[in-house]
Image (cartoon, rainbow, N blue to C red):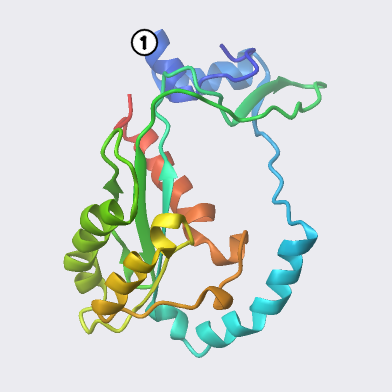
Amino acid sequence: MASKPDPPIQASMAKALNVSQQVVSYQLKHTLKKKCHKKPKCHHLNERLLQIRRQRSWPLYKLLCKDRWRKFITTDETWIYLSDTNAKSKVIYLSRGQNRRELTLSTTVPHPKGWMGISANGVTKPWFVQPGAKINSEYYIQKILKPFLKDDYCILYPNGDAVFHQDFAPSHASRITQKFIMDQQVQLPRPQQWMPNGPDAASCDYFLWEHLKNKLISKEFLC
């Protein structure tokens, strides 16, 4: 299993071999003399994105400085890939002396899509898109935003004084969605105030989702 270009995670190995994950870890390290390496990933910015980030960095700083970042809820969606579905993995096991090989992460297996947010006051509950649903403005408003504003938003910010940040996917940036959010008297940052494609301004992409997926795997919620 460990010699495959896209090896299963240790939890899946343990399940397939009917042993504990500790046994798998020990055998990989001491018997096979292999060490787990995360496949290299590059955060690429082209010249256009660099220019946009230069233009927006100061407005973003003014928006977040003096503890105003504590009033922000930033949200995002992601695909959640189930284990044991022949998907490409993010890690590869190498023996001493072998070179790392850059392999493209790809998959065509069924996977649910989840939506979640994070703020200084805590995280929201995850909301999952119904299988086969078309995520247009109406779906986003009825199935995501309304439950979120009714439950999590009021719990995290009882005074209703938070700024709600989302990316600019078509269902988010549409006039219908923007009007609905403003009608709820929820503040939105302007597009010119947020930097694109940046780990420093996308805590969901670069922390929250990875943390949640690791928790799901460790708790064996996904099988």
In percent of width and height, residue 6 lies at 60, 20
In the picture shown, does residue 207 fall above or below 33? below
Q: Depth check: 101 or 13 in front?
A: 101
Q: Quadrant of the N terminus?
A: top right
| Residue under the image location 50 percent in, 61 percent down | 203
| Residue under the image location 30 percent in, 33 percent down | 132
- Residue under label 1: 18
Q: Kindly identify the amino acid type of the residue bearing the numbered disc 1.
A: Asn
In the picture shown, does residue 36 fall above or below 199? above
Helix, strand or loop at label 1? It is: loop
Q: Depth check: 138 or 20 in front?
A: 138
- Residue most toward the front? 175
In the picture shown, does residue 20 fall above or below 111? above
- Residue most toward the bottom? 66
In percent of width and height, residue 105 lies at 61, 30
| Residue under the image location 40 percent in, 37 percent down | 80
Q: Quadrant of the C terminus?
A: top left
84 relative to 48 in the view: left or right: left
| Residue under the image location 54 percent in, 54 percent down | 206
